[in-house]
Image (cartoon, rainbow, N blue to C red):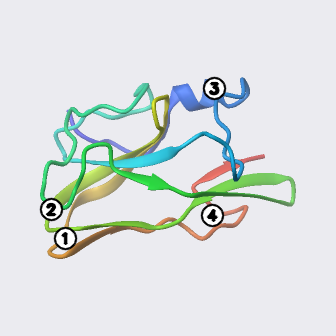
Amino acid sequence: MSFTGNYTCDTFTLGLPSGDFDFATGTTDVFKIALYTNSASLNASTAAYTTTGEVVATGYTAGGEILTPTVAISNGTSFIDFGDVSWSGAFTARGALIYKNGGAAICVLDFGSDKTSTTTFQVQFPVNTNTSALIRIS
């Protein structure tokens, strides 16, 4: 099985109202993004970070990179954005998993096709607004 779309993971949907995720600045929660090949099986039921199907290449470390969240609210919608992240190296990835380090999966990102870098692989997040941020809650 391969990527079939973008998903908010069930563990995030269930854990958010329970207080399992704290995106506020200065908290102890650490969020990461890991890259995956087309052989990964990630979807809404993905519960946590997995190494199965993860990119293996020079310049990429298993587990991915730390993300820095920004939380804001506008017009009754709170939204969470992350700073863009990049890796040095030549490799191919089909998608990504954002997750809480040592904890639950948050969302699956499907890049739509394999993306290949020759020097730097970058994931750029949408503009941080109440209508375009990656995570929006209203």
Residue at the spot 16% in from the left edge and 39% down from the top edge: 39
Q: CA distance from mark 4 to mark 2?
A: 28 Å
Cβ atoms under marks 1 and 2 closer than 8 Å? yes
- Of labels 1 and 2, earlier in sequence is 2
Q: Which numbered dot is residue 132?
A: 4
Residue at the spot 24% in from the left edge and 53% down from the top edge: 94
Residue at the spot 68% in from the left edge and 39% down from the top edge: 22
Q: Which numbered dot is residue 103?
A: none
Q: Can you identify the residue that label 3 sits on? A: 15
Q: Which numbered dot is residue 117?
A: 1
Residue 120 drawn at (x, y percent):
25, 73
Q: Nearer the viewer, mark 1 or mark 4?
A: 1
Going by the numbered disc 1, the residue's amino acid type is Ser
Cβ atoms under marks 3 and 4 closer than 8 Å? no
Would you call the spot at circle 3 few (<14 residues within 10 Å), some (14-19), or many (20 or more)? some
Q: Which numbered dot is residue 91?
A: 2
Cβ atoms under marks 3 and 1 closer than 8 Å? no
